[in-house]
Image: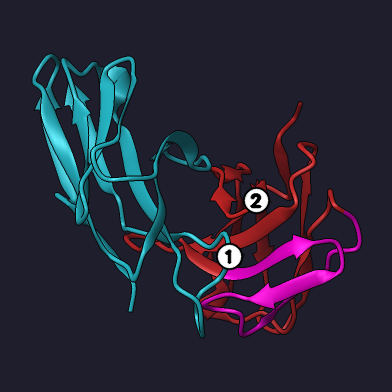
Chain colours: A cyan, B red
Amino acid sequence: EDQVTQSPEALRLQEGESSSLNCSYTVSGLRGLFWYRQDPGKGPEFLFTLYSAGEEKEKERLKATLTKKESFLHITAPKPEDSATYLCAVQATGVGRGSTLGRLYFGRGTQLTVWP
Amino acid sequence: NAGVTQTPKFRILKIGQSMTLQCTQDMNHNYMYWYRQDPGMGLKLIYYSVGAGITDKGEVPNGYNVSRSTTEDFPLRLELAAPSQTSVYFCASSYYSSGKSYEQYFGPGTRLTVT
């Protein structure tokens, strides 16, 4: 069965202290990997899509990378406003029972807290 | 563009009551989805739709029903509410074409409590 695992569950960083979040996945074939940011009481906000191993995307202090088995979300010199839960989701190419065109499998998220 | 809008934002139901959660998108997306999010758990897909008149079950469809009569609207119906349906519900939409996936855009959510 397709699975997405995120680690760590929670991460506390001091402002300016760079780190990485991990998303490992097991799918029959990867169509796309998505990163979202979710603030308390709000819906997930799209950050990046990665389609193939070796691909990288950047946005301000965030950089997402992809290998055949996992993705990293690197946070460089974070600020308190980067505090949020970061969600990873994958879309598989597999067909058959339980597979759905366009369907995303979500991890449980990493709760990031950046303190001043 | 308003994106994806959901109503109501909050609702308290008694066991056995029914209600409809509304979802509308103005991005002309062909795909729409309903998820539920429980504390400490990932988003779980309830139902999805690939276009007007076409819907299908996701991972956790029991106790819910959907319909999609227009491209813009995708309401979720709860029949005979149970405490297990206490959750935050998110509607999302995306565009899909020719085997390429595009990101899903989420609404602000509906927080439902069943007591």
Q: Residue at x 32, y 58 (%)?
A: A107
If the image is split into quadrants, where does the C terminus of chain A sit?
top left
Residue B66 in view here: no
Q: Position of residue A105 (x, y in %)?
A: 42, 62
Asked if residue B112 lies in the magenta stretch, the reply is no
Residue B105 in which image quadrant: top right
Query: Which subunit holds the residue at mark 2?
Result: B
- Vertical placement of residue B66 versus A106, above or below: below
- Chain of residue at mark 1: A
The local crowd at label 2, few if under 14, some if 14 to 19, many if 20 or more residues have their Cα within 10 Å, is: some
Q: Do the residues labelled 1 and 2 touch (CB within 8 Å)?
A: yes
The residue wearing badge 2 is B96
Q: In this view, does B4 lie above or below B92?
A: above
In the rendered image, residue B49, in percent from the top left (x then y), is placed at 72, 65
The segment highlighted magenta reads B46-70
Dividing the picture into quadrants, the one containing residue A34 is: top left
Instruction: Give the CA separation, mark 1 to mark 2.
Output: 9 Å
Left or right, A41 with reference to B29: left
Disc 1 with disc 2 on a shared chain = no
Q: What residue type is labelled 1?
A: Leu
Q: State the SS at label 1.
A: loop
Left or right, A87 with respect to A114, comes to right
Residue type (three-letter) at the residue carrying disc 2: Tyr
Magenta stretch holds residue B58: yes
Pointer 1: residues within 10 angstroms few (<14), some, or many (20+)? some
Q: Is residue A115 visible?
A: yes
Residue under the point 80% across and 37% down: B26
User: Is residue B3 or residue A24 the one in the foreground?
Assistant: A24
Per the image, label 2 sits on a secondary structure element best described as: strand
Residue with the mark numbered 1: A101
